[in-house]
């Protein structure tokens, strides 16, 4: 009740917002832009944001984007981190599909993979909440819970001195999210949806974060391979601002991310 | 030598844990206020992103953060200063050109909202309009 009252007060405050109509004449020089802060927690959008942009179209067949059960018994820590990110993106897909059983299945797999990385202790209560919200069809809250779960996994990795794996979780989520979005756009092409694919700076930023991880991790065959393929993906998503990606452009991005995703999921690591 | 190894390892682990910067009390306060501003947009269906950026805003300096946004979404960037000050939030596109936004300014709290026509890189700036500066925090919401 108190929460509702607070929201009411804030809603009133929103009504008195002053639209100042900011001028559009300002310009920042390139050297200032180069100094801008870039951080995982705010510069990289979540899969939920990507799906929200696509979800404006009622025609998206979210449940058609599910993938079969995936292994949760990987041994390589980098591969577990990449798959954990992908699995969290799958959770967002199930929320978009409003499929409570699928959300619960994915929640349980997330905990299993997190356990394999030794970062599950705080997540068990998240798993319970996810089940509860799924049972009650609280989709908005579930989306918030998934975001919080992803952040908890990452902060737990940081406190376990596993910072290098954090970017791999983010990257795995982005690759799986982009795979799903491109597949959905190909099934039901419309120009407005295709515009979400223009993200060269995002891919460049993730690539730069991978270049900062320890040399040992960077030399792991899977990480090396994914990193090399990111260069091609960056080119595939580098559309001029005024250009809307055509169906063929979307297909190219889908093929590129599907290839990487197949390697991330595979039990056979690249040599 | 073996005796020293655990000590070296402990120092390494300790150093790594300090590398993850802790938030100050002022930043926590600013974050709470920024979330209050963002909360107002929740009634319009905006979801608050579980992430934030805290820093220090100084006179005549832009505090800038890079964000990657999607065409098709609407965004509100909400900020609050921990100290008495007047702040403003503005958004710039990847070329550095300021984009037209809806704005909210209320002393230590400010917000800017817009719907990007193109997906890609944008820059959000928190500026000091009046005051000596201090800690601030920015959060964003989308729908």
Image (spheres, coloured by chain):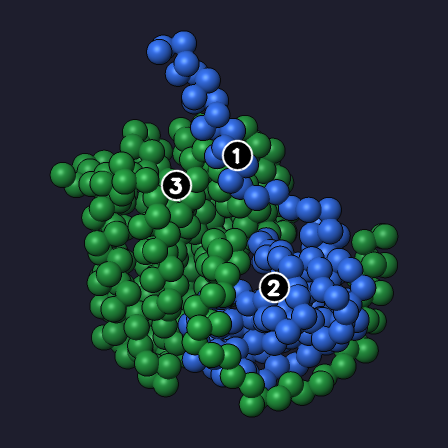
For chain A, the rendered hue is green
> Which mark, by number, is residue A198?
none
Q: CA distance from mark 3 to mark 1?
A: 13 Å
Q: Which mark is residue A164?
A: 3
Chain letter of the residue carrying label 3: A
In the rendered structure, find residue B17 and report the number of the disc placed on it.
1
How far from the left and from the top, in percent, is residue B102? Answer: 66, 81
| Residue at image location 48% in from the left, 72% down from the top | A32
- How far is the residue under mark 2 from the one under mark 3? 26 Å
| A151 w.r.t. B137: above or below | above
In the figure, the shade used to draw chain B is blue
Residue at (34%, 62%) from the top-left corner?
A: A204
Disc number lying in front (3 or 1): 1
Residue A238 lies, in percent from the top left, at: 30, 73
**Image spot of residue B137 (x, y percent):** 66, 59
* Chain letter, disc 1 residue: B
Q: Quarter of the image containing the N terminus of chain B? A: top left
Q: Residue at x 59, y 66 (%)?
A: B63
Q: Which residue is mark 2?
A: B140
Q: Are marks 3 and 1 on the same chain?
A: no
């Amino acid at each position: 009740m108190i929460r509702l009252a607070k929201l009411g007060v804030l809603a009133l405050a929103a009504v008195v917002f002053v639209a100042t109509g900011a001028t559009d004449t300002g310009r920042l020089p390139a050297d200032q832009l180069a100094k801008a802060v870039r951080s995982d927690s705010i510069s990289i959008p979540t899969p939920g944001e990507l799906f929200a942009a696509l979800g404006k179209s009622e025609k998206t067949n979210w449940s058609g984007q599910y993938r079969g059960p995936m292994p949760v018994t990987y041994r390589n820590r980098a591969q577990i981190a990449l798959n954990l990110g992908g699995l969290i993106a799958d959770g967002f897909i199930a929320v978009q599909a409003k499929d409570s059983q699928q959300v619960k299945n994915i929640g349980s797999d997330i905990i299993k993979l997190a356990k394999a990385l030794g970062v599950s202790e705080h997540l068990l209560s998240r798993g319970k909440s996810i089940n509860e919200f799924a049972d009650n069809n609280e989709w908005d809250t579930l989306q918030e819970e998934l975001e919080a779960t992803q952040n908890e996994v990452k902060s737990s990795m940081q406190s376990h001195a596993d910072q290098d794996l954090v970017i791999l979780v983010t990257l795995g989520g982005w690759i799986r999210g982009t795979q799903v979005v491109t597949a959905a756009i190909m099934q039901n092409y419309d120009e407005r949806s295709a515009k979400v694919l223009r993200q060269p700076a995002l891919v460049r930023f993730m690539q730069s974060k991978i270049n900062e991880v320890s040399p040992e991790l960077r030399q792991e065959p899977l990480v090396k391979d994914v990193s090399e393929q990111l260069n091609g993906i960056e080119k595939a998503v580098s559309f001029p601002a005024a250009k809307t990606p055509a169906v063929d452009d979307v297909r190219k991005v889908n093929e590129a991310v599907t290839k990487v995703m197949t390697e991330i999921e595979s039990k056979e690591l690249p040599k | 030598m073996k005796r020293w190894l655990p000590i070296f390892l402990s120092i390494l682990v300790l150093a790594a844990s300090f590398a993850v910067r802790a938030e100050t009390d002022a930043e926590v306060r600013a974050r709470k206020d920024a979330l209050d501003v963002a909360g107002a947009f929740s009634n319009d269906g905006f979801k608050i992103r579980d992430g934030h950026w805290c820093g220090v805003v100084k006179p005549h300096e832009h505090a800038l953060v890079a964000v990657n946004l999607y065409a098709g979404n609407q965004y509100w960037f909400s900020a609050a200063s921990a100290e008495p000050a007047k702040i403003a939030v503005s958004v710039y596109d990847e070329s550095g050109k300021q984009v037209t936004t809806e704005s909210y300014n209320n002393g230590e709290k400010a917000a800017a909202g817009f719907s990007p026509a193109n997906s890609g890189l944008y820059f959000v700036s928190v500026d000091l309009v009046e005051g000596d500066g201090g800690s601030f925090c920015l959060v964003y919401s989308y729908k």
